[in-house]
Amino acid sequence: MPTAPLPQFPAGFRWGVSTSAYQIEGAVGADGRGPSIWDTFAHSPGRIADGSSGDVACEHYHRHREDVALLAGLGVTAYRFSVAWPRIQPGGTGPAHPRGLDFYDRLVDELLAHDIDPVATLYHWDLPQPLEDAGGWLARDTAARFAGYADLVAARLGDRVKLWITLNEPFVQMSLGYGTGEHAPGRTLLFDAFPVAHHQLLGHGLAVAALRARSGSPVAIANNYSPVRARGGTDADRSAAAAYEALHNRLFTDPLLGRGYPEGTIGDPSVVRDEDLAVIAAPIDVLGVNYYNPTGVRAPQEGSPLPFELAPLDGYPRTAFDWPVAPDGLHELLGWLHRTYGDALPPVEITESGCAYHDVPDADGRVHDPERVAYLDGHLRAVRAALDDGVDVRGYFVWSLLDNWEWAEGFTKRFGLVHVDYATQARTPKSSYAWLRDAIAAARRKPAR
Ligand code: FCB
């Protein structure tokens, strides 16, 4: 358990936690919500490790006051949640469903009453099923639909949300959702999934304009990044690493920051119209960075459909997801963003960072998670090291407040600072919650620098 106090962070540094709608809300039939691709996927046999779905999840929809009290107890200055598109437009188009908006209205007001900045993500993977039936993110029209939805949410919440995030991890939506099929909607198009990248980015750009028309608050996107390490010293290993880096780290960042698509990533060029790149490169105020781990890459076996092969990275402790715990990777990544994009890089906020462990209550009902404390301590020190190098990092959001429904892993992976007993919905703050509460309090007490 780390005992040394954390170093200082700049005054106004944002301390937050993140969640997403389908992973915590439950209440999938409440107040007119329509089905999303995740409802369909989770209810298809064999898709989810434990056969579960997000039908009930953490019942946050009905317990949001209790959950905001947990946020207040933690002392965070911001809370990142996502708005469920199928609650706002159950059919994916048309006017807003008022009762869907009412829920987020109540949540936002509850947060503000506790001095917590509402940070709203508009899309955390829960596409309304009717839009998937019309082609999903393979269809260009979905980009315009997304901007229409952004407009509806901003019209209601634009005066109170403090930071907008358009999309969460469009790389994962493309690669796991449409490339390999491990996530909803379960398509297996491999590199033919490229239009999903372009249409999400176009939707992002159109949504930036819609948000700016309704709200004076800053706008961001949350991309996930992974520093890429070549395993093996051959030229083929190095080009495999470069190919993976283009796909994972640059495909969704180069065009945003005005550089167009990295060479070799576009696939069918007719998907990209001349005017699209300017829309995509609309200035953003913050780049959201989700970081979990670095990736080892080597040259593919002969006959592989991919230009790379993922390879394990040795020498790190591992989480219950078998992900390496590598705070040095976060430091490396922030340096890479800073060097690669220079002045084009907006201020950065770490919009997700966290770890899964097999957290079980002890005989007294307490949940000790020293590994998570060590994880957070290490990653916060990595952020501090990046600040020292001159990277403008403005905030850090832990994934996640609560144990929750972890997509294809169902309830088998616990990422929360707060343990959830899914049978009773009892919330029990883990020891990492107490540690983070004390760390935030100490950081906020310190003089500005
Ligand atoms: C990220 C997702 C988030 C959660 C964490 C563990 O990729 O954005 O919803 O699943 O991973």
Image (cartoon, rainbow, N blue to C red):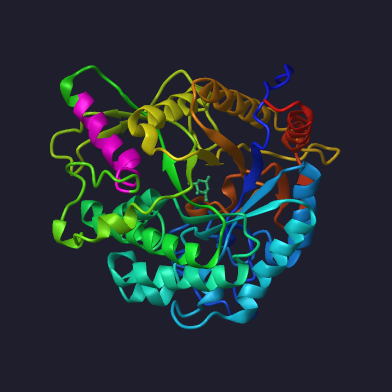
Horizontal side of 10 relative to 194 (left or right) equals right
Residue stretch rendered in magenta on the structure: 237-255
Above/below status of 384 relative to 255: above
**Residue 249 magenta-drawn?**
yes
Horizontal side of 133 relative to 31 (left or right) equals left
Above/below status of 346 relative to 142: above
Horizontal side of 127 relative to 52 (left or right) equals left
281 or 44, which lies in front? 281
Secondary structure of the magenta portion, mostly? helix
What is the x, y in percent for residue 348? Answer: 50, 38
Q: Which residue: 75% across, 31% down?
A: 435
Asked which quadrant contains residue 138, the reply is bottom left
264 or 375, which lies in front? 264
What is the x, y in percent for residue 104? Answer: 65, 67
Asked which quadrant contains residue 174, the reply is bottom left
- Asked if residue 188 can be seen in this view, the reply is no
What is the x, y in percent for residue 152? Answer: 52, 74
Q: Which residue: 59% across, 65% down?
A: 158
397 or 321, which lies in front? 397
Above/below status of 52 relative to 297: below
- Asked if residue 310 can be seen in this view, the reply is yes
Viewport quadrant of the N terminus: top right
